[in-house]
Amino acid sequence: MTHQIVCRDLLEVITGYLDGALPADVHAAVEEHLSGCDGCTTVLEEFRTTIALTGTLTEEQITDAQRDTLLAAFRGWAG
Amino acid sequence: MELVERLTPSMRRVARMFVSTDAVADEVVQEAWVGVLKGIDAFEGRSSLRTWIFRILVNTAKTRGQREARSVPFATLAGDDLDEPTWDPTAFDADGNWTSLPMDWRGLPEERLAGRETLAVIGRAIEALPPMQAEVIRLRDVLGWSSEEVRNALGLTDTNQRVLLHRARAKVRAAIEDHLRSVSA
């Protein structure tokens, strides 16, 4: 075991872990920790759920007026 | 034309971070599109098209903000809470291990977890974030951009992009939990 991580510190690197952006030894330490820690596994799953739920939101529609103004201007430049 | 419609809401918000009014932000977006049309021949495909468009937008917005003598400190855009812990420190012992386990969402009925109310809670939580945190989570988690695209588009370092996203996700997660507790109470 070259590296160990405690619960408090693991929560700080969840996003890095999910992005696959952690150094290899830290990534391995996170996996090792998760395999034996219900609390941290729960929070990791909650982050995954949060990301999935956030992904179901849709970008709010710009108002028709704004879009019309913009598209009119765009047609002017393009033409 | 579809690209214009798709990118414009994000572009208006990003522009608004650097300039004083919505009207000026709209002008910046239009100016950026002119720049895109003029420069499209020079686009070499080394980044994604949308990343390249955002680089032009951010540069245009920053220039306009400087002309307005409106220089917004990074901390104002990014939030002053980037160094705060992800979780309430009192949930851990002196060694940093759990003393009180987190609430477990698993086992909650799907319709309550993923219901319209929860989505409204998420939307409001994102709107309440500091502007750069809000934009990073919108681009990453709502629109599904990669970390590299977001970093390039907004001119952030790899570390900054990740810290902003992590703070944003942590706050959205906490808002969902508050909501779930209030409806189950």
Image (cartoon, helix red, strand yellow):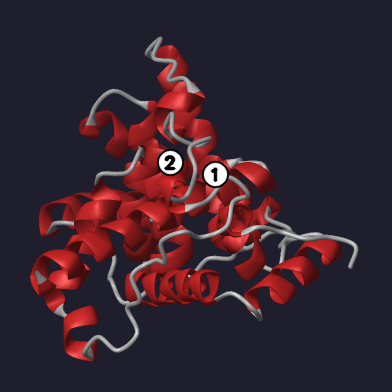
Q: Is residue B136 above or below residue A1?
A: above
Q: Position of residue B100 (x, y in %)?
A: 41, 61
For the residue pair A37 and B71, the one nearer the viewer reads as: A37
Front position among marks 2 and 1:
2
Q: Residues within 10 Å of mark 1 (few under 14, many from 20)?
A: some
Q: Is residue B182 left or right of residue B25?
A: left
Inspect the image, locate mark 2, and give the three-letter code of the amino acid beneath it: Met
Residue under numbered circle 1: B154
* Residue contact at pointers 2 and 1, CB within 8 angstroms: yes
Name above or below for residue B6 compared with residue B13: below
The quarter of the rendered structure image containing the C terminus of chain A is bottom left
Point out the image quarter for the N terminus of chain A. bottom right
Q: Taking B79 as reference, is A29 left or right?
A: right
Residue sitting at x 68%, y 71%: A33
Which disc number belongs to residue B67? none
Q: Amino acid at mark 1?
A: Leu
Residue B184, quarter of picture: bottom left
Q: Do the dots labelled 2 and 1 sit on one chain?
A: yes
Name the residue that disc number 2 marks.
B132
Q: Secondary structure at mark 1?
A: helix
Please state if B21 lies on the left or on the right of B55 as rendered: left
Residue at mark 2 to residue at mark 1: CA–CA distance: 9 Å
